[in-house]
Every structure is written in structure tokens, then in C-alpha cells.
Amino acid sequence: MATCQSREGCTNRATHWVLIEYSWPTLPKEMRTYLLCVDHMQRAQKSASNQISKYPETGIRIVEHGTLQTN
């Protein structure tokens, strides 16, 4: 069982994966993958949307996301 990788120290079970692209005007683009619980996945989607609206030159973009398979 994977644990949520939120920076808030969440200990909930991860149910989703997300690939995030970070791009800044003076730095190279970077992509990172995180395992998140449902709550933090929803927060990530909202945060990325707000970031693009407020600061289009500085991007945090969700490239792909999905649900983790459970057995």
C-alpha cells in the first residue's frame, strides 16, 4: 500500500498518480511524479489551474494523471 506523497505529511493511502510539469522563466522545465490520496489529487488539480490563471509565464501543469490499481 502506497502512502500519499503530499508535502503536508498526509498518511492516507495513495489512490492516484499525477505527473506534474514545472516551468519557470529562468530555469529548465522539470517533471515529477507523485502518488496522492483523493483529497490531495483534487487540491493539486485546483492549484495547477489557479497557477496558470494567475501566472501564465510560470507554469505548474498536470501532464497526466490516473487511478492506482488495487488488488
Image: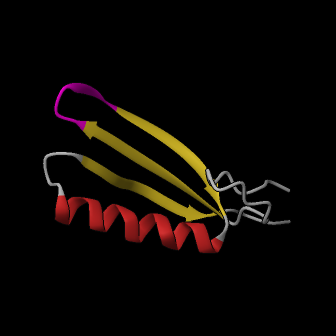
Check the image and report above or below for 8 versus 67. above
Check the image and report above or below for 31 versus 1. above
Identify which residue is drawn at 25% across, 48% down.
59
Q: Total marks drawn? A: 0
In this picture, which residue range is highlighted in magenta?
24-29
Seen in the image, is 23 located left or right of residue 18?
A: left
Q: Quadrant of residue 28?
A: top left
Seen in the image, is 37 located left or right of residue 26?
A: right
- Please say whether residue 27 is one of the residues in the magenta stretch: yes
The spot of residue 19 in percent (x, y) is: 47, 49
The spot of residue 35 in percent (x, y) is: 64, 53
* Quarter of the image that includes the C terminus: bottom right
The spot of residue 62 in percent (x, y) is: 38, 56
Identify which residue is drawn at 78% across, 66% down.
12
- Between 29 and 70, the one lying in front of the other is 29
Identify which residue is drawn at 36% across, 44% down.
21
- Please say whether residue 9 is one of the residues in the magenta stretch: no
Identify which residue is drawn at 39% across, 71% down.
46
The spot of residue 18 in percent (x, y) is: 52, 55
Check the image and report above or below for 21 versus 35. above
Check the image and report above or below for 58 versus 15. above
